[in-house]
Image (cartoon, grey):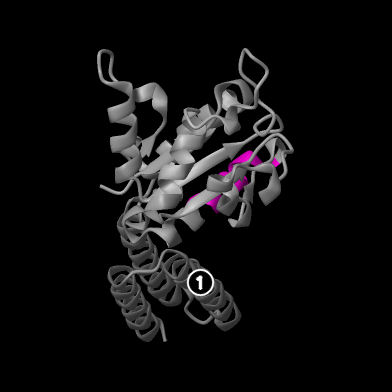
């Protein structure tokens, strides 16, 4: 099962990590987003965490303003310790060569390679994704779309437009196109000799169908996948049939 692993430091970005988990869970499902709060009581912490990390297709590294400068009780930088869990998570993800996405929160900026341990220097070269409080929901939609492009399996489970998945959305679009065609036929018969009213009604229906198809096309291109492209072909075929029925 494709999953998203969220790596974060509690003292730096626990609140942001929680919001990130909640919003991505809404878009992909609870069982496809992991944060360490989900480890069952009595489980071996290290083994459970490493197993979930090894199963992840994407690892998000949440970086806040204090992420780089967090220190332990002796005043040493936590990232300098080989036993630091955040460091271990990132090292393991980089070693697996899975997509590792730095997520910048709270106005944080990416660290430079020379600010990181050698084993983490590669992280500085990864393209980061910045999340703002002012546009959080929009940013989450954009992040989810990018994760869907990274992982075809995640793309199949992405919920969009009020919780509809791609399949449900395309069925909804098909229904709307059919309804538009039926309504157009009814209005044409009812218009009688009102040619101008008939033309206005037809243009409105055409515009509605075009917008619907544009949304469907953009969604397919964003998510990809042969199944979605076949679904789009069926939607377009339905639209063509309705156009023929109207005109």
The crowd level at tag 1 (other Cα within 10 Å; few <14, some 14-19, many 20+) is: few
Residue 49 visible in the current orientation: yes
* Residue to which mark 1 is pinned: 214
Magenta span contains residue 162: no
Q: Is residue 187 left or right of residue 230?
A: right
Give left or right: position of 74 versus 234. Answer: right
Closest to the observer: 125 or 217?
125
Residue 225 horizontal side relative to residue 218, left or right: left
Can see residue 162?
no
174 lies above or below 11: below
- Seen in the picture, residue 208 relative to 148 is either above or below; the reply is below
The residue closer to the viewer here, 163 or 87, is 87
Helix, strand or loop at label 1? It is: helix
Q: Identify the image quadrant of the C terminus.
A: bottom left
Closest to the observer, 230 or 125: 125
**191 w.r.t. 174: above or below:** below
Q: Residue at x 58, y 56 (%)?
A: 126
């Amino acid at each position: 099962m494709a999953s998203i692993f969220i790596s974060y430091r509690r003292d730096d970005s626990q609140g942001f990590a929680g919001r990130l988990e909640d919003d991505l869970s809404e878009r992909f499902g609870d069982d496809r987003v992991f944060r360490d709060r989900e480890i069952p009581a009595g489980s071996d912490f290290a083994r459970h965490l490493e197993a979930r990390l090894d199963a992840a297709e994407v690892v998000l590294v949440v970086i806040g303003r204090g992420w780089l400068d967090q220190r332990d009780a002796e005043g040493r930088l936590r990232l300098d310790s080989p036993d630091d869990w955040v460091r271990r998570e990132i090292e393991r993800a980089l070693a697996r060569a899975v997509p590792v996405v730095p997520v910048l929160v709270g106005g944080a900026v990416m660290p430079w390679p020379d600010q990181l341990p050698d084993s983490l220097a590669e992280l500085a070269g990864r393209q980061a994704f910045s999340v703002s409080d002012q546009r959080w929901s929009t940013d989450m939609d954009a992040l989810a779309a990018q994760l869907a492009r990274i992982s075809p399996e995640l793309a199949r489970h992405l919920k969009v437009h009020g919780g509809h998945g791609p399949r449900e959305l395309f069925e909804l679009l098909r229904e709307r196109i059919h309804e538009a065609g039926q309504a157009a036929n009814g209005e044409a018969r009812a218009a009688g000799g009102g040619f101008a009213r008939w033309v206005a009604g037809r243009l409105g229906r055409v515009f509605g169908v075009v917008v619907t198809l544009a949304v469907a096309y953009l969604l397919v291109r964003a998510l990809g996948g042969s199944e979605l492209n076949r679904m789009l072909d069926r939607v377009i075929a339905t639209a063509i049939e309705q156009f023929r029925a109207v005109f």
